[in-house]
Amino acid sequence: MSAFTLRLPNSVHQTIKELAARDEISVNQFIASAAAEKMATVLTLDHLRREADEGQREDFLQVLDRVPEAPPLSGDEWLEA
């Protein structure tokens, strides 16, 4: 495990302390969890962008062509604006 110094504005630090206490976890656990959530978000976006770059519009249209013509199921209708 690694340790590092993190400088935060006092207001941010205080809010983190309050939120960590509310969740009954330490400030360290709160910050580690927040960092892991951010990391997961960035890595997911990276993955989706790579997948999108490799996608072929023709393949997508072929899949859509296999969808049967049918009215939408109840609850799947377009809502009027």
Image (cartoon, grey):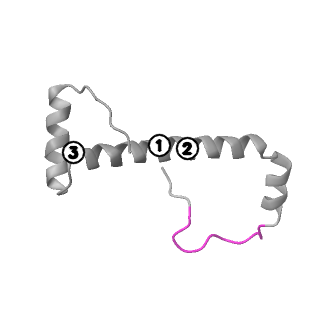
Residue 48, percent from left and from top: 63, 46
Q: Residue at x 66, y 71 (%)?
A: 71
For the magenta stretch, what is the residue range?
67-77
Single out the mark in the foreground, 3 or 1: 3
* Quarter of the figure with residue 13: top left
Q: Is residue 34 above or below residue 8?
A: below
Instruction: Find numbered disc 1 in the image and state the secondary structure of the residue it sits on.
Output: helix
Q: Residue at x 16, y 39 (%)?
A: 15
Write down the residue under mark 3: 27
Write down the residue under mark 2: 43
Residue 60 is one of the magenta-drawn residues:
no
Residue that lies at the very extreme toward the bottom in this rendered image: 74
Query: In the image shown, does 69 or 55 lie closer to the viewer?
Result: 55
Disc 1 crowd, CA 10 A, few/some/many (<14, 14-19, 20+): few
Q: Amino acid at mark 2?
A: Leu
Q: Amino acid at mark 1?
A: Met
Single out the mark in the foreground, 2 or 3: 3
Q: How far apart are the two marked residues, 1 and 2, measured between alpha carbons?
A: 6 Å
Q: How far apart are the two marked residues, 3 and 1, measured between alpha carbons?
A: 18 Å
Tag 1 or tag 3, which sits nearer the N-term?
3
Pointers 3 and 1 in contact (CB under 8 A)? no
Residue 1, percent from left and from top: 38, 45
Write down the residue under mark 1: 39
Tag 3 or tag 2, which sits nearer the N-term?
3
Q: Is 78 on the left or on the right of 38, as rendered?
A: right
Residue 56, percent from left and from top: 82, 46
Q: Is 37 on the left or on the right of 30, as rendered?
A: right
Instruction: Find numbered disc 2 in the image and state the secondary structure of the residue it sits on.
Output: helix
| Main SS of residues in magenta | loop
Instruction: Find numbered disc 3 in the image and state the secondary structure of the residue it sits on.
Output: helix
